[in-house]
Image: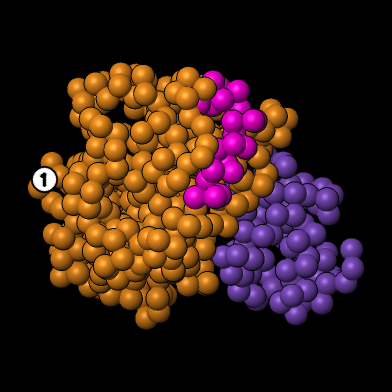
Chain colours: A orange, B purple
Amino acid sequence: MFRLTAAEKEAVLLPELVELTEHHRAACLPYRRILDAVGAAPPYERVADLPWLPVRLFKTHELRSVPEDQVFRVLTSSGTTGQRPSRVYLDRAAAAAQTRMLAATLREVLGERRLPMLVVDSRSVTRDPTLSARGAGVLGMMTFGRDHTFVLDEQGRVDAEAVKGFLARHGHERFLVFGFTFLVWVHLRALGADLSRGVLVHSGGWKRLADQAVGNAEFRRRLADECGLTRVHNFYGMVEQIGTVFLEGPDGDGLYCPDFADVVIRDPNTWQEAPTSVPGLIEVVSTLPTSYPGHVLLTEDLGVVRGVDDGGLPGKRFEVLGRLSRAEARGCSDTAGDTVGQS
Amino acid sequence: MNHLDRLRAVFRMALNLPADADVDGLEYRAVPQWDSLAHMALIAAMEDEFSVMIDTDEMIDMASFAKAAELLEKHGIGATAL
């Protein structure tokens, strides 16, 4: 799942993404209008030449490429205050593909087996009837575990007894630890438990840790020192490209793209692809979105490619630097509204 | 009880269905009771009942009662044809 070099990936992805672009153009009227408005048309010579959609359009437009009666699941993002949530439409095939490809991606670090699983959260987040993004994330990951044990009780306090019991049952074998980055930082270190057989998978962003001046290197060092956790994998993904996750390599040298996905970092002023080491907006591409036009998306996150074919895994390795500030986002969306699509 | 009857009982229990519910035609997410949380409970209950270990891919593929019966067969639990 992380086998292709940058050049190999470009060769594999380009025809598939071109085909998806034409498929969605034919099947999704709002998407066609956007492409027409920006004059996007083949031939496209590189993945970076493909027209992109700003991810926020999923909040304002009904973007689906399947008839309404074939919609199997509608996913919604957590709308931050005052924002409408994104709506993502999956038919049966797309829903099955996203689960399968997420499993294939995580298999790289977890293996085939469902591992005993420690969830750094409270069981109550999975019961929310209108599932929060956090609850959906926990539920999605629970597929990869067994004997799910929650580190926090219903009131959000550390349940040391539950963890002790879990480690008595499974502390001698490989187990999975999953949680949102900030919760992992706050609660795992306080446990004082030996988690050295654990594989930590975490996500959810660094904003609250950045406020405390904690970056990834510090995060990894302290978790290794204080809990023995050395197999640590951050990931980056979004509901608008469900099933695609960009996964931190074993050496912590950046986020890597699975073979069916890639990133393009764009200069927010010129929209051209930024060179390695130069920050810009993150565009995510993936072949999974077949039932909605989410195969080429411009996010509102800033990121930087740290290297290409030079790390623990082949392909680009990148880092997410944070959200575009609101003022920047406003300026950007004005521009993006005018130039949706073509570089 | 044969394996299929045991499997039916596991389905009814894990999905909170009435004791006389017909489960043979059930499909994942086609009824509100069989959501992703219930799916995990169902898998765990099957593992307990039949002493098998179900892998991630098998769990994802088990999208109907019929698939569950096939899965048992694959694990050497002698489920006869439906």
Residue A24 position in % (x across, y down): 59, 34
Which structural element holds mark 1?
Answer: loop
Could you tell me the amino acid type at mark 1? Answer: Gln
| A18 drawn magenta | yes
Q: Quadrant of residue A267?
A: top left
Q: Please report the bounds of the magenta region as a residue range.
A: A14-35
> Quick one: which residue is furthest to the left in this view?
A213
Count of numbered labels shown in the rendering:
1
Question: Is A75 placed left or right of A250 in the picture?
Answer: right
Q: Which residue: 88% across, 72% down?
A: B80
Q: Which residue: 34% across, 46% down?
A: A264
| A273 drawn magenta | no
The majority secondary structure of the magenta stretch comes to helix
Local packing at callout 1 (Cα closer than 10 Å; few below 14, some 14-19, many 20+) is few
- Asked whether residue A64 is in view, the answer is no
- Asked whether residue A269 is in view, the answer is yes
Asked if residue A212 is positioned above or below residue A314 in the image, the reply reads above
Residue A310 position in % (x across, y down): 26, 67
Q: Which residue: 37% across, 24% down?
A: A339
Query: Looking at the figure, which quarter contains the C terminus of chain A?
Result: top left
Of the pair A299 and A121, the residue shown nearer to us: A299
Q: State the residue position of label 1.
A: A212
Question: Is A324 placed left or right of A197 in the picture?
Answer: left
Of the pair B9 and A138, the residue shown nearer to us: A138
Residue A161 position in % (x across, y down): 33, 63
